[in-house]
Amino acid sequence: MTTTAEAPRRTLARPTPTGTAAAVVVLALLGAAIWAFSSLRLNIATFVDGAANAVDFAGRTLPLDFPPLGELLALCGQTLAIVVCATLLASLISVPVAVLAASNTALGGTSRFGARVIIVVARAIPDVVLAIVFFRMFGFGGLTGVLAMGLHSIGMIGKLYADAIEQIDEGPRTAIRAAGGTRLQQLVTGVPPQVLPSFVATSLHRLDINLRVSVVLGFVGVGGLGQAISDSLRTLDYQRGMALASVVFGLCVLVEVVSGAIRRGLLGVREERRGPLAAVRRRVQIPAPRRETAIVAERASSPRPISPPWTAGRVRRTGCWLVTALVVVASVWGADISLAQFQRAITDFGPTLALFWPPETGGILPELLAELLVTVQIALAATLIGAILALPVGALAANNVAPNPAVAKFFRGVVLAVRGVPELVLAIVFVVITGLGAVAGALALGVGSVGLLGKLVADSLEEVDRGKERALRATGASRLQVFFAATVPQAAPAFVAHVLYQLDTNLRSATLLGLVGAGGIGYYLLNASRVLEFGVVTTVLALTFAVVMLVELLALWLRRLVR
């Protein structure tokens, strides 16, 4: 009896054209980042040469000079009021935008496309440009910051809201439709209970981001701590400027901690970890088409009171909702928003917009294009620095990778501390140490990227399938072998997506850091607004918008391939 040898089986998937194209693009981006890093002359000599400047800067900064307590509290209150109102405005507008943008709730293809365009455009227009426009319309005051941050925030909040709506369980809506409910009843009754946890978490996360953005907008006329920092640095009063910057850092950390507590208090652990129908699904393992019937039957067999009992959890959540409502009311009052400003703005709306048209396309265009290239270099180099630093920090912050919980907790604290420092403050420090130019911007954004990217890396590593890790550990593999053979391969697609998101963020942030001399096109943007050359502002906006849109589309394509 003869036997034939079996043909060797393929252990790796055959490369596909799209996969190969994605790999080529990722390698091209990596090469571009290395090129940008080299072109900006980021090396050890830069830090050695800046050591003396760092010592001199510390001497001019210390001791910190804090303003009187009453003035400091007023600045903090005004800043927080503007940030809360801006986030609230963005959250309210984002709800209908997200409903129209989600594939399962959109009225049609046209409405979905229009809503998605609004989200992308809001993300692509820098908030500092909106602040310049609104400053011409409303003048000094909180309204400029509320509208600038609020409208720009729709880009992030609307997108995440739409993603949350698309991920809901369609069972409740199907049951309501089967009972004869209208489209509006299906939307109002079947969607909010499932998306509320995600909506609250997204809004609180944006609140934290807007607090750091408020420092940047202080350089273009938005009141609060940002404007006070701008005034101090303009007069070279580093003791007062850095003291106020340390206050911003404390506020950012405080808001991060408090927002987490509010999220847990408003939603409770049960709602954050699973949807309202998760318990039913665990008890009733039946196909999805009959799920809503089983739910109705279960509720009919075990009737519950119309009003749930006042347990400790419900009392805590109700108290948090009341406190949140009071904070919102106080913020609207503290932001100093007046109807007179709206009336004046409506009257001057046409003449104000006419100042920004036509865009300047004369002899300054080649210079702006050259500075735009520097801005792109800053974003690429900063993303490379952030990725290199965030990988070890994020890995040690993950509970399944760190040697022990104490190490993970420590590095989580490091990530939180870095996130609390606004990139503009880092840029100011590096400008003083390394001098004006793109080096300061790249270093500031690179260090600042560790905060967000480190957190995303840690979360991605903790969300991998632990079964593969346990299987390798059972064969006697070391901790390092388990990490590289089981943990990293599972988290790699998410890491690529996170780096692309960070590149998108850094590109917009690089434009803003030019306001303090950290290189790039932002410096021209600030000067043009100060000398009333609004055509240049429009040109800068158009150039920045085009590059951001290109990166946004590229990142969207790559994220779909690496999922």
Image (cartoon, rainbow, N blue to C red):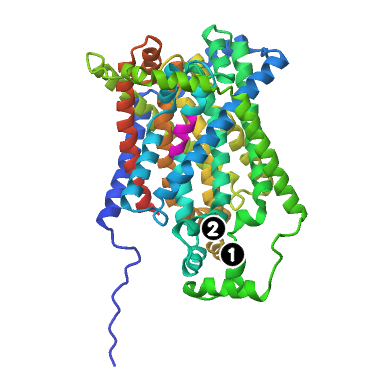
Proximity of marks 1 and 2: CB atoms separated by less than 8 Å? no
Residue at the image point whose x is 34% and y is 23% from the top: 374
| Magenta-tinted stretch | 149-155
Residue at the image point whose x is 34% and y is 44% from the top: 114
Quarter holding residue 362: top left
Residue 248 in view (yes/no): no
Q: Main secondary structure of the magenta part?
A: helix
Quarter holding residue 32: top left
**Quarter of the picture holding the C terminus:** bottom left
Helix, strand or loop status at disc 1: helix
Residue 371 x/y as whole percent: 32, 20
Q: Earlier in the sequence, mark 1 or mark 2?
A: 2
- Residue labelled with disc 2: 189
Residue 548 lies in the magenta stretch = no
Q: Is 27 displayed left or right of 506 in the figure?
A: left
Few, some or many C-alpha atoms within 10 Å of disc 1 (few <14, some 14-19, many ≥20)?
A: some
- Residue labelled with disc 1: 278
* For discs 1 and 2, the disc positioned in front in the rendered view: 2
Q: Residue furthest bottom?
A: 1
- Indicate the amino acid at tag 2: Thr
Camera-side residue of 304 and 283: 304
Q: Is residue 267 above or below residue 431?
A: below
Residue 546 x/y as whole percent: 30, 32
- Indicate the amino acid at tag 1: Ala
Whole-number angstrom distance, CA of label 1 to CA of label 2? 17 Å
